[in-house]
Amino acid sequence: MINVTKVFLPPIKEYHKQLQRAWDNQWLTNRGELVLELEEKLKRHLEVSNIIVTNNGTVPLQIALKILGKGGEVITTPFSYVATSAAIVWENCKPIFVDIHPEYLTIDETKIEKAITSKTTAILATHVFGNPCNVNAIELIAKKHDLKVIYDAAHCFGVKYNDKSIFDYGDISTCSFHATKLFHTGEGGAIFSKDINLQHKLFYSHNFGHNGALAFHGVGINGKISELQAAMGLSVLPYMDEILFERKKIIDYYGTNLDLLQIQVLKIRENTLWNYSYYPIVCRTEEQLLRVEKKLNENKIFPRRYFYPSLNTIEYTKGAMMPISESISARILCLPLYVGISSQQLKTIVSIINENL
Ligand SMILES: *Cc1c(COP(=O)(O)O)cnc(C)c1O
């Protein structure tokens, strides 16, 4: 069976070695030695100003929205994983969708201003598939209208834009270290802000608001990651170069062998150092997609319809129509992409797709 992804597992000996440290310390959570080391190593690896490693990629979105969304209207993309708009609704904010760019698949910044009202507090956009939003244009709009910018950068491990980590754009960025993501800790994530005051708020918010053992800076929640998960992160991190190298090879194979006259592929924004996180193809019609998917499934190959449905069509968001996002969502399929997929398997995938377009 070939799935859209397969978790990268480091040699178990290396994980054991990291776990042994937790045993030796008799310390499993509350920001122990392994979590602190993971944060230091990630800070250097990603070249970011700040990082707080968290228990997943959704709680940091909630924390960011709690602090910056403030129960107002949050302008967002309809083309993302459901966590993006679910977090907005969960935090009692109202998602206001703005359609996406048809090739970059990120929020269409030229349509943002029309969606701003007196109730708008923030913009929450996704760098979907690791492809950066037009961060410079969004920053100008936010400044002009006094809005905060949050980026769901769940797919962005290692992405640079204009030679700077993508996590350093916006007021707050979040990442996911879920097992299906590029870099993982089993479950995990991170939250980033280069603003020192905001960083302080994020920090205490992810630890019940604690100011030492007996006092509180303010309200907080539990967004902490454990030593056991940090041990996984410390074991996976040394393999990132190898992982990227292998994924690039697979993407190059798809790019040179798929019938690109029949399908659309992701256009990466200029000046981006990308991370090869996903390989989506956009078919001409949904019928074409379903035909290709069915044939692949018959051969035990399971790509995923990332991201379907368009988030504005979900019952609880009740968004306006988003023609581009709805059209892309109905026609997009993410192909299998992971370390260890064989060239024979890739050949099979490509020939099934080309024959059924
Ligand atoms: C995976 C993902 C999340 C959620 O991350 P978890 O670590 O699973 O909580 C949020 N947004 C996007 C775009 C994602 O793909």
Image (cartoon, grey):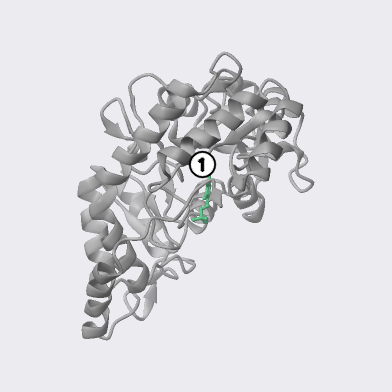
SS class of the residue under badge 1?
Answer: loop
Which x, y percent locates residue 118? 64, 32
Mark 1, ligand 1, within 8 Å: the answer is no
Q: Position of residue 312 (x, y in %)?
A: 72, 37
Residue 189 visible somewhere in the drawing:
yes
158 up-or-down from 227: above or below? above
**Image quarter of residue 25:** bottom left
Type of amino acid at the residue the image marks with label 1: Pro
Q: In the image as oriented, which residue stretches furthest toward the top? A: 261
Q: Which residue lies at the image location 34% right of the left edge and 57% below the top edge?
A: 52
* Left or right: residue 300 compared with residue 330: left
Marker count (numbered): 1
Q: Say left or right for 183 vs 90.
A: left
Q: Position of residue 202 (x, y in %)?
A: 40, 56
Picture coordinates of residue 48, whole percent (x, y): 26, 44
Residue 310 vs residue 49, the one in the foreground: 310
Which residue has dot 1 on it?
336
Q: Nearer the viewer, residue 171 or 328?
A: 328
Q: Nearer the viewer, residue 179 or 40?
A: 179
Query: Which residue shows up at 59% across the image and 39% down it?
Result: 80
Residue at 47% across, 66% down: 220
**Which quadrant holds the C terminus?**
top right
When the figure is inspected, residue 233 is found, relative to residue 151, above or below; the finding is below
* Residue 150 in view, yes or no: no
Residue at x-position 37% and y-position 76%: 215
Circle 1 residues within 10 Å: few <14, some 14–19, many ≥20:
many
14 w.r.t. 95: above or below? below
